[in-house]
Amino acid sequence: MFHHVKDLQFNARVSRPDPRFANLLLEQFGGENGELAAAMQYFTQAFGAKQPHPDKYDMLMDIAVEEFSHLEIVGATIQMLLKGVNGEMKNAAEQSEIMQVMDGKATKESIIHAALTANPQFPIITGGGPTLRNSQGIPWCASYIHSNGDLTVDLRSNLASESRAKLVYEHLMKFTDDPYVKETLSFLMTREVTHYKMFEAALDTIQPNFPPAVLGADPRFLQQVYNLSDGTVRGPWNEGEIKGMGKDFVYVEDPITYVTETEGQTKQPKEMAKALAEKEKLDKQMSQVKSDEVKKAEPEGVAQWSTY
C-alpha cells in the first residue's frame, strides 16, 4: 500500500528555465539508467525474495519506494526547467530570473525554440512536461529491468545499476551551472552510493553467495585462462590464486595446442574425476539447502501475503 506525501524527499529548486538541460535530465526520468528503471527493478525483484528472505524483501521494497520518490524529484525539476514552454508559470527559487520569459516576444520565442531544438516532443507531443522517454525521445522499455529470480544475482545487478546511475548524475552535473539543480543532482547521486552500500551489505548476509545460484563451477574448466592475443598482460586476473577459491589460475600459453591435445577439453587428467564427483555431491547438498530454505519460509494452508 502506498501513501503519497506531496512534499518532496529533497526540496528541488531551479534558478531559471533551461529546456536543453531539461531534455538531458529525461535520461534519469525515462532512460535506461533512470529512476523509474531502478524503482521497477527493485520492486519486481522483491516478490521473489518475500519467502526465502523477508528481510531483503523489506529492503528492496523500501529502496524501490525511495526510487519512485526520486523519479518525482527528477520530474519536478524537469517541469521547473521548462517554465515558459508549457505556458504555466509556477513558483521557483528566483522569480526575477524566471520572468525573463516574459521580457518580450523575442525572448520567449528563443526559449521555446531551445525546447524544440532539444526535444520536439516537449512542446508538441507532451504539451511541455516530462514523459517516460529518454533524451532522444525513445520510450521507456521493460527490457531495462534485470530480475533473475536468484537474490544473489539480483543484488549484483543492483550494484551495477546504482553504479551506472551515479555515473549518469555525475555527467549531468557537467552540463548545468544552476547551483540549485546541481544541489539536487548531488543529492540524487549520493543516494545511489547509499543504496550501493545497502545492496552490498545485504549480499554479504547471504552465505554462501558465490558462485551465484545453486550449481558450483566445474573443476575441469575453472582454472584455465588463455593467451588469446599477442602481448597478453599478466596480472591477478590470470595468475596466482583465484581469490577466495583456494586454487591457482593455470595460464595456457598456446590455447590451440592445448585444445587440440585435450580433444576439445574432453580429455582430462584422472584426478579430475574425483574433483568432479565432489562437485556433484556439493551441488546436491546446495540444491537441498536452497529448497529447504524456501519451503520453511512458506506458510502452511491458505497462502496470505500480509498479516493484518
Image (cartoon, rainbow, N blue to C red):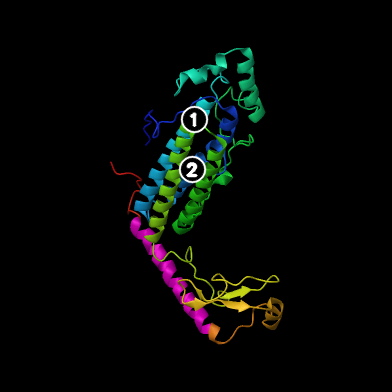
Identify whether 54 is placed above or below 99.
below
Q: Is residue 108 left or right of residue 98?
A: right
Task: Give the residue number, with chain letter if any, for mark 2.
Answer: 40
Residue 271, percent from left and from top: 54, 86
Mark number, residue 7: none
Q: 11 or 296: nearer the eye?
A: 11
- Few, some or many residues within 10 Å of mark 1 (<14, 14–19, 20+): many
- Residue at 38% over, 59% down: 294
Q: Earlier in the sequence, mark 1 or mark 2?
A: 2
- Looking at the image, residue 304 lies above or below residue 285: above
Span shown in magenta:
273-297
Across and down, in percent, residue 205 comes to 36, 60
The secondary structure making up most of the magenta span is helix
How would you rate the neighbour count of disc 2 (Cα within 10 Å): few for under 14, some for 14-19, many for 20 or more?
many
Residue 119 in sight in this render: no
Q: Is residue 87 magenta?
A: no
Q: Amino acid at mark 1?
A: Thr
Q: Which residue is mark 1?
A: 77
The answer to whether 15 appears left or right of 194 in the picture is right
In the image, what residue occupies the spot 56% across and 19% down?
A: 84
Q: Foreground residue, 132 or 1?
A: 132
Please tell me whether residue 290 belongs to the stretch shown in magenta: yes
Q: Could you say which is closer to the camera, residue 170 or residue 305?
A: 170
